Amino acid sequence: MSDAATPAPRLLDLFCGAGGAAMGYHRAGFDVVGVDIRAQPHYPFEFHQADAMTYPLDGFDAIHASPPCQAYSTATADKSKHPDIYVATRERLMKHGTPWAIENVIGAPYHFGIVLCGTMFGLEADGEWLRRHRNVETSWLMLQPRHAHRRDRRPVTIIGKSFLRQTKDCGRHSRQGTFQTCQSLMGIDWMTRSELVQAIPPAYTFFIGKQLMAEVLERPAWIPCDCCENVICTIHRMHAHDCECPPIDEWMTDPYSTGGWALRKETP
C-alpha cells in the first residue's frame, strides 16, 4: 500500500510473544515493533525486551495488545497465579487515544468487540480445521465475519506444549494434532512448540489490520508547528487556532499523498 517514499504506519505490538499477531499486521501494511518482557529470539520484526505496561506509546500510529491470557483461560488450573491486567491494559490504551486493538481468549473481561474463528478464514490443513476462538476488542466499530464450523469432525485444539505423532480425537470436543499440522493450520512456520501454543494465526490480525489501516488513514492527525506553540491538522491543513505563521501550503508536503500519518515538514 506504500512505496519507497512513503513510510508505512507504525504499529506497536504489546505482549508480542513470537510474532503471530505481528505477521498479520505486517501483511496488512504496517511497520511493526514488538515489546515483550521476555526475550523473543524468533520475533520476525523489530523487538524490544521491556515491560509492555510501561513502554512508551508515543510515536506509533496504532497499537495492538495481547495481555497474558492464563488468568482467563479454561485450560489454566490455578488462575490466581497469573497476572490479571486486561482491564489495566485497555484503560491505558483508551487514555492514550491512538487507535488500538486488544486480543485475548474467551473469558477475558472485554466490554465489546467480536470473536474471531479459524473457520472465518478457511484455516484448514491435512483434512483438519482450526477453531481457536479469540475475543477482539477495538477502539473502532468492527464487524464480525460468519462462523463456518464443520460438522464432519472435531476441530484441532492447540494447547500445552505436547504434540502427537498422529492427529486424533482428544477429550470430549476436540482433536490434538501433530506439530506440523498445527503449524499449517496456524499459518506459522518460524516458532517453537511452546511459542506456537501461545500464538494467534496471522490471518486474524491481517483481517483486523486491514480495518485498522483504514482507521489510521482516515483519522485526522495533529502535529506541532515549529513556528509557534500551535498544532496543525495534517488532513485539513490548518492550525487549530489563529496565528501569524506563514500559510501552511508554503511549507507543508501534501498530506493526501500520505494519508496524513507520514507527513514530513520541509524547511520554511
Image: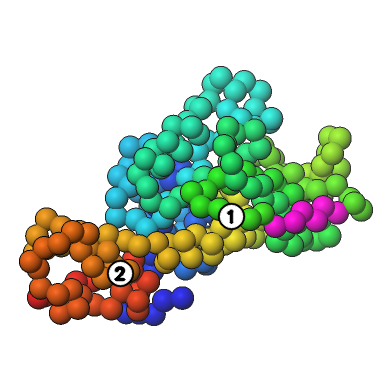
Residue 141, compared with residue 170, is above or below; it is below
Q: Amino acid at mark 2?
A: His
Q: Decide: few, some or many residues near mark 2? Use Cα within 10 Å; few <14, some 14-19, many ≥20.
A: few
Point out the tag, 1 or 2, that comes first from the N-terminus. Answer: 1
Residue extending furthest toward the right: 152
Q: Is residue 211 left or right of residue 93?
A: right
Disc number for residue 9:
none
Q: Residue 82: x, y in percent?
A: 53, 25
Residue 193 or residue 137, whichever sits in front: 137
Q: Which residue: 55% across, 45% down?
A: 137
Q: Residue 207: x, y in percent?
A: 59, 61
> The C terminus is located in which quarter?
bottom left
Query: What predominant SS class does the magenta segment belong to?
Result: loop
Residue 84 or residue 46, whichever sits in front: 84
Q: Which residue is mark 2?
A: 236
Write down the region rendered in magenta.
145-150
